[in-house]
Image (spheres, rainbow, N blue to C red):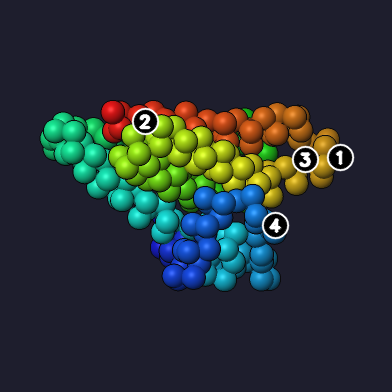
Amino acid sequence: MSVNKLKYFFAVDTRYVLKKLMILMFPYTHQDWEVRYHRDTPLTPRQDVNAPDLYIPTMAFITYILLAGMALGIQKRFSPEVLGLCASTALVWIIIEVLVMLLSLYLLTVHSDLSTFDLIAYSGYKYVGMIFTVLSGLLFGNDGYYVALVWSSCALMFFIVRSLKMKILPSISSDSMGMGSNAKPQLRLYITVATAVFQPIIIYWLTSHLVR
């Protein structure tokens, strides 16, 4: 693991975090999704709001676990074992999702700029929506939970499609002109869409048991 590479994903500031959270919750108003480069090197998150980061996913994951503990405590169901199971389940889902994505890109010989850290970042952004969903469920009951679930799921799917579109789909036209690529363009589109559609399922799976 490259320490310098890891530092890149934590090169954030308050302005970036606030802007990124707004994009995650209200992505429909965002226009420019292109990641910017300087001499073939992507700009850091604090310089480019479209750059993926690991700060928000990490903090959102921790906040989700703390919120889960609070929700279980309110319902008199808290125990260290249950909280540990909640944390490990959420972590395992991230690992599985990233591994499936890496395997899909490898089997389809898709050449993109996506690294493992990029995939972890995009996968980890779902915790922001999960926090919003659980909070809405605790404050407004089941109706608030399902309204928040629909909103956060649609916002995340839109965000994932627009973000991955800049990384995966642009290579379709260039690769389809060459003879060395066996990947079909429509299969690459399916990867992007399937990744987005899978997000609401995980959000529901990891939050529904916290709101009753």
User: Closer to the observer: label 3 or label 1?
Assistant: 3
Depth order, front residue of 199/167: 199
For the N terminus, give its image quadrant: bottom left
**Mark drawn on residue 142:** 2
For label 4, the crowd category at 10 Å Cα-Cα, with few meaning under 14, some 14 to 19 and many 20 or more, is few
Judging depth in this view, the residue of 78 and 192 nearest the camera is 78
- As helix, strand or loop, the secondary structure at mark 1 comes to loop
Residue 160 appears in view: no
Q: Is residue 8 left or right of residue 185?
A: left
The local crowd at label 2, few if under 14, some if 14 to 19, many if 20 or more residues have their Cα within 10 Å, is: some
Residue occupied by mark 4: 31
* Marks 2 and 1, how far apart at CA: 51 Å
Residue type at mark 2: give it.
Answer: Asn
Q: Nearer the viewer, mark 4 or mark 1?
A: 4
Assess disc 1: are there few (<14), some (14-19) or many (≥20) residues with their C-alpha within 10 Å of its C-alpha: few
Q: Which amino acid, mark 3? A: Ile
